[in-house]
Image (cartoon, grey):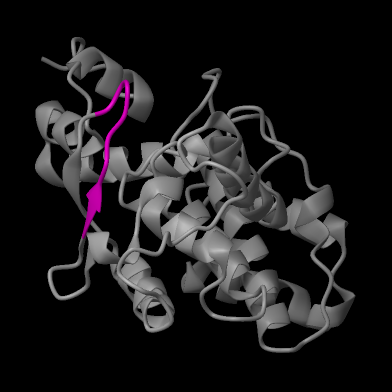
């Protein structure tokens, strides 16, 4: 992403400082022709916008009071699906937003770390400090009506977040405290709101195919990309059905056999 950000910086340097960048500057860059002279694909448009958005968020995190013109830069949705996986670049953007909230390990950041490990919004409120093994970079997920209990792999970013957070937790303490009974639906709604607030901060909630489940879908998609096996993704997601796993990560596995 840094190469794209550097190209943008060079593009606007002749006319503006970074504090004077307008939505028109961003729109012109995002829709610029590719190096081959072709119109950019929809995926490229989203990639460029996400790159600029991450750059502006990073500057704010460093204390530079800069606006984010990309919030006014609308693009068509990437898919017609109800919930799509986030891209790697979008996940990095959401992480930046999580760490820009003040303390390094907020409830929202911890919820994001667990979602990156394939936890559902119903599972997240049930996870305790004792379920985490930082040395193995794993977390025990409890499962539920539609997902199996499993040992899930934490991302490197997730390990860092939980490492900072666990020092203040007893083994039986829930990592993402919610009001009321953690077994009930309001707890799940609270988790959805936490992750949803991060997506909103990243400017992604305006896209109709981005929901709190998009983080878990990204995790499953990443596992599938690494392994090349839909059954590996299904197992990691705690899903018994390969069809359900393929639907979640947006993979036409029958058409690719």
- x 34%, y 29%: residue: 249
On the image, which quarter does residue 7 sit in? Answer: bottom right
Against 124, residue 107 (above or below) is below
> Residue 90 placed where, x, y %?
52, 53
Q: Quadrant of residue 98?
A: bottom right
* Farthest residue, direction top: 254
Q: In the image, what residue occupies the spot 77% across and 40% down?
A: 74
Q: Depth check: give the residue in front, 160 or 26.
A: 160
- Where's residue 134, x and y in %? 21, 73
Q: Where the C terminus falls, by quadrant?
A: top left
For the image, the number of numbered tags is 0
Residue ID at (40%, 75%): 169
Relative to 226, residue 75 above or below: above
Residue 92 visible in this rendered orientation of the protein:
yes
Query: As drawn, is 10 to the left or to the right of 210?
Result: right
Prevailing secondary structure class for the magenta stretch in the rendered image? loop
- Judge left or right: residue 32 versus residue 104: right
Per the rendered image, the range of residues in magenta is 139-147
Judge whether residue 146 is colored magenta: yes
Q: Residue furthest bottom?
A: 63
- x and y percentages locating residue 194 in the rendered image: 61, 51
Q: Is residue 63 one of those drawn in magenta?
A: no
Front-lying residue, 31 or 168: 168
| On screen, residue 226 above or below 249 | below
* Image vertical order of residue 96 relative to residue 140, above or below: below
Q: Is residue 46 left or right of residue 150?
A: right
Residue 86: percent from left, percent from top: 47, 43
Q: Is residue 235 left or right of residue 100?
A: left
Q: Can see residue 93?
A: no
**In percent of the image, x 43 and y 77: which residue is there?**
165
């Amino acid at each position: 992403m840094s190469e794209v950000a550097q190209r943008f910086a060079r593009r606007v340097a002749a006319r503006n400082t970074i504090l004077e960048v307008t939505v028109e500057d961003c729109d012109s860059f995002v829709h610029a022709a590719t190096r081959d002279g072709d119109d950019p694909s929809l995926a490229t448009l989203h990639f460029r916008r996400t790159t600029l958005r991450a750059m502006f968020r990073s500057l704010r995190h460093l204390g530079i009071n800069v606006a984010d013109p990309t919030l006014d830069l609308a693009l068509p949705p990437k898919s017609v699906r109800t919930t799509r996986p986030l891209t790697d670049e979008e996940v990095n953007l959401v992480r930046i937003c999580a760490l820009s909230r003040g303390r390094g390990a907020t409830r929202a950041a911890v919820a994001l770390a667990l979602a990156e490990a394939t936890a559902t919004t119903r599972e997240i409120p049930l996870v305790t400090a004792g379920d985490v093994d930082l040395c193995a970079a794993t977390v025990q997920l409890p499962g539920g009506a539609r997902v199996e209990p499993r040992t899930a792999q934490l991302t490197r970013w997730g390990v860092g977040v939980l490492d900072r957070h666990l020092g203040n937790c007893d083994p039986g303490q829930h990592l993402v405290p919610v009001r009321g009974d953690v077994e009930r639906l309001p707890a799940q709604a609270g988790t959805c709101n936490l992750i949803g607030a991060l997506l909103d901060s990243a400017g992604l909630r305006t896209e109709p195919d981005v929901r709190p489940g998009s983080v878990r879908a990204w995790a499953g998609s990443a596992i599938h990309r690494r392994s090349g096996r839909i059954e590996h993704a299904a197992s990691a997601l705690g899903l018994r059905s390969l069809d359900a796993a393929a639907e979640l990560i947006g993979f036409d596995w029958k058409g690719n056999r």
